[in-house]
Amino acid sequence: MAIVATIDLGIVIFDYTYISTRDIYLSRLPWIAQQYDPIKGIEPYRDTDQYLDLVESLKEAGPQPTAQRAQILANLRDRSLEMIVENPFEGANKTGTLEKIKNRMRKHLPNEEDSAKQSFQEFWASERLTPQNWQEELTFFEQDIAPLIASNYFRPIAENNLPIDYFWPRIDILFTIIFGIDLLFRTLSLSRRPDMTWRDAVLWRWYDILLLLPFWRLLRVIPVALRLHQARLIDLSRAQVLMNRFLAENIASEVTELAIIQAFTVAQTSIKQGALREWLSASAQPTVQINDVNEIDELIHQVLTLTVRRVLPTIQPDLEALLRHTITEALAGIPIYREMQRLPGVGQLPHDIAREIVHQVTQAAYGGLSQAIEDQKGRALTSHLTEQFTTSLREELQDRKTLMNVQSLLSDLLEETKLTIVQRLESEDIDQTITQVQQLRQDSSARNKQPTVEIIPPSK
């Protein structure tokens, strides 16, 4: 079927180019023009056809001066003037052909006025066409002028205001029937799958629909190329890579920027329209729940767990040093502490006591927090603390001045983030990204193609 589709595409291209290349077929392959002119509704143009018939009559009359010959030459002079003035080539969009005829005749018989009319009048003059130059002049006309006149044609206009064309009912309909039957059977085969409906099957072979359209026939190059690729007669892998690169270079960055800008703009608009105020309001509408978990409580619990188990052990030495310095400075203001430092053998005792106290306090606090986040009662207290914190925060943020300040800061933060992301996207080298993706695919393909090594145990 791929070969049939290719043949059909070749015929379609031939049909589209036939009118513009018809002169070539007339001069080199006249039998093609004779067979295909009726398909395009092309008929001989009456005036130019009669002009060439007069020339044939002149040949039959012979080179000797006779009354019949003189009459034919007079008719040729009159029809030459009519051809130049009325331009019968205009209907076939071949005015350039008439200009070529005029130029060749002027070149053959130049005159002071550089007039094609005068050249034709002189060419068909009885006193000029003598038996001596008869054959030479008619040979010039047959080789240089007659083929151009013969290329003119008449093409009737149909009721749809377009030139008559029988390509569809005489040729293309046969291929359309073949492709329609093929699409029907392919659709029936695909629709038998349990996960495939009739509509899905048609959409799966959407490109085959282009083979059925009686218009835009050049789009058939798409299904033909895909069919040839599927039949492994051609390889479109490189074209696919180039198409992906084109889409990535011209669409991906714009779509990404548009999505990011739209998302941040929606967030900014929601904040400006009072979304934060509604969330803080005690009478706010409940949000849609997708599970039985209070996400805010769970997030706070996760943060506390991470802080106690990971962060506090790391900063414990620094925290003890800070607390020891604070206690030491506070004790330094007490008179009895200063007096104790002066006693021999007791000067460092206050420092040791402060260090021990700080160590015991931090250890007790860390142990208490660790136990609090693990047992049931500690979890309940943490949840209660979270609720109280959220309620207090909402109440404090109800102040109009504070709320407006927070909204302004959030909106500015979103704007800065949006501009930063867009700037980074614009500076990103899309070619480098595509190259990295292709390299990753090649590495993955190479790993998948590596042969597995079978370890054979040694024979006993």
Image: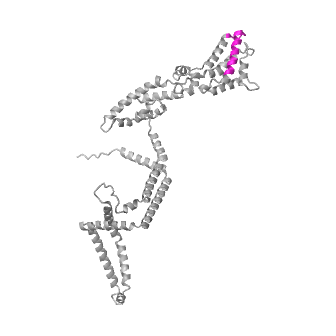
Outermost residue, left side: 460
Residue 47, position as x, y percentages in the image: 63, 19
Looking at the image, residue 174 lies above or below residue 58:
below
Q: Which image quadrant for residue 189?
A: top left
Is residue 65 highlighted in magenta?
yes
Please say whether residue 233 is visible from this viewpoint.
Answer: no
Residue at figure coordinates x 70%, y 11% from the top left: 69
Residue stretch in magenta: 61-82
Observer-nearest of 61 and 342: 61
* Residue 388 colored in magenta in the image: no
Give the position of the N terminus as an image quadrant. top left
| Above or below: residue 276 compared with residue 434 | below
- Residue 329 position in % (x across, y down): 38, 82
The residue lying toward the viewer, choosing from 449 and 94, is 94
Residue 323 visible: yes
Side of 70 where 192 appears, left or right:
left
Residue lying farthest to the front in this orientation? 283
**Closest to the observer: 286 or 366?**
286
Picture coordinates of residue 373, whole percent (x, y): 28, 67
